[in-house]
Image (cartoon, rainbow, N blue to C red):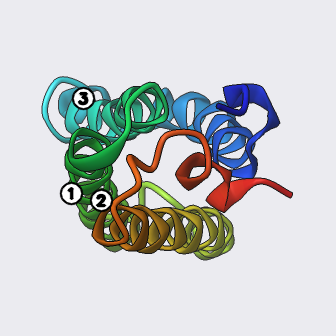
Amino acid sequence: MPNAKDLVIFTQTYDLLTWLLPQCERFPKSQRFVVTQRLQGAALDFQEAIFEANARGGAERLAYLQAADAHLNKLRLYLRLSRQWEWLGSGQYAHVSRMVAQVGKLLGGWIKQTRAASTSGHSGRGRAAEAGAG
């Protein structure tokens, strides 16, 4: 199984987190314990789910990848709200949207590869995680 630090999806998720989390500190204090906390939670939950998926194979991996997809969809929602409420400028929103879209493409490829491996009778361990390898 490839090391997590060698996979593009992990590197890009790390980059997303290191950009996003400091931005949240600039959001209105009144919202930090509501929307901001959920936005940060969705981003961190996404990262945890892909780490868990990388440590597993087969159907268990697929379940974690699907959970990661759900976390990414929540993150997209909270980012759209942040833009609508002008907590993120248009340039910031465009930047983070590109980052999320790229991570989403990598995740989609990993899910597709894991499904294909499970239908061909392989556990998906090792090869499925390479979907994001560069």
Residue named by callout 2? 69
* Residue 72, position as x, y percentages in the image: 34, 57
Which is more N-terminal, label 3 or label 1?
3
Q: Which element carries disc 1, helix, strand or loop?
A: helix
Q: Quadrant of residue 5 in the image?
A: top right
Which is more N-terminal, label 3 or label 2?
3
Asked if labels 1 and 2 touch by Cβ distance under 8 angstroms, the answer is yes
* Residue 81, position as x, y percentages in the image: 26, 65
Which class describes the residues within 10 Å of circle 3: few (<14), some (14-19), or many (20+)? few
Q: Which amino acid does label 3 sit on?
A: Gln
Left or right relative to 84: residue 8 = right
Q: Quadrant of residue 92 in the image?
A: bottom right
* Residue 71, position as x, y percentages in the image: 26, 49
Cα gap from disc 2 to disc 3, whole angstroms: 19 Å
Residue named by callout 1? 70
Q: Which amino acid does label 2 sit on?
A: Asp
Q: Which amino acid does label 1 sit on?
A: Ala
* Residue 93, position as x, y percentages in the image: 56, 68
| Residue at 33%, 69% in the rendered image | 115
Cα gap from disc 2 to disc 1, whole angstroms: 4 Å
Which class describes the residues within 10 Å of circle 2: few (<14), some (14-19), or many (20+)? some
Q: Which of marks 2 and 3 is in front?
A: 2
| Residue at 50%, 34% in the rendered image | 26
Q: Tell me the tag on residue 37.
A: 3
